[in-house]
């Protein structure tokens, strides 16, 4: 999903669940408002607060992409079928000047 599309959906209150897989330090420095902090290791150990509905729409992001790709694979293994990555990840979100929550 493109950052502008996600922002547009936030404004229309049709936001998918955003899963941010960066470190705690990165997350606290600024994340997409309403995002769930769920590093890949928490997903792997089933410690992340994920939606119970396996068909829920999820958008996964990290800083540049590799961690998000890994998390997307893990989510698929756990039965989540409606998962996509944020295009350009957090670096693109920030460069576009979209809102951050701290």
Image (spheres, grey):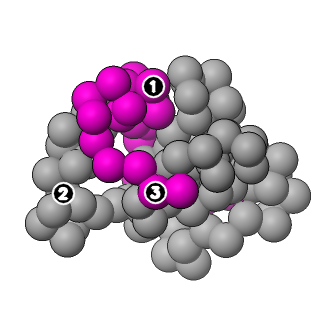
When the figure is inspected, residue 14 is found, relative to residue 19, above or below; the finding is below
Measured in 3D between alpha carbons, the distance from the residue under mark 1 to the one under mark 2, in whole angstroms, is 19 Å
Q: Looking at the picture, how far across and down is residue 85, in whole percent?
A: 44, 36
Q: Is residue 1 visible?
A: yes
Residue drawn at 46 percent across, 33 percent down: 90
Quadrant of the drawing holding the N terminus: top left
Residue drawn at 50 percent across, 49 percent down: 31
Measured in 3D between alpha carbons, the distance from the residue under mark 1 to the one under mark 3, in whole angstroms, is 15 Å
Going from N to C along the chain, the mark reached first, 3 or 2, is 2
Please tell me whether residue 87 belongs to the stretch shown in magenta: yes
Going from N to C along the chain, the mark reached first, 1 or 2, is 2
Q: Nearer the viewer, mark 1 or mark 2?
A: 1
Crowding around mark 1 (Cα neighbors within 10 Å: few <14, some 14 to 19, many 20+) is some
Reading the image, the residue beneath label 3 is 101
Q: Is residue 77 visible?
A: no
Chain part drawn in magenta? 76-102
Residue drawn at 52 percent across, 68 percent down: 54
Measured in 3D between alpha carbons, the distance from the residue under mark 3 to the one under mark 2, in whole angstroms, is 17 Å
In the foreground, 63 or 46: 63
Quarter of the rendering containing residue 52: bottom right
Q: Looking at the picture, how far across and down is residue 16, in whole percent?
A: 34, 61
């Amino acid at each position: 999903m493109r950052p502008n599309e996600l922002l547009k959906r936030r404004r229309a209150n049709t936001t998918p669940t955003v899963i941010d897989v960066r470190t705690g330090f990165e997350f606290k420095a600024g994340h997409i408002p309403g995002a769930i902090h769920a590093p890949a290791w928490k997903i792997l150990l089933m410690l992340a607060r994920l939606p119970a509905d396996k068909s829920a729409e999820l958008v996964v992001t990290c800083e540049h992409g590799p961690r998000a790709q890994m998390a997307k694979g893990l989510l698929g293994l756990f039965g989540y079928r409606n998962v996509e990555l944020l295009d350009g990840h957090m670096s693109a979100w920030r460069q576009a000047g979209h809102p951050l929550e701290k």
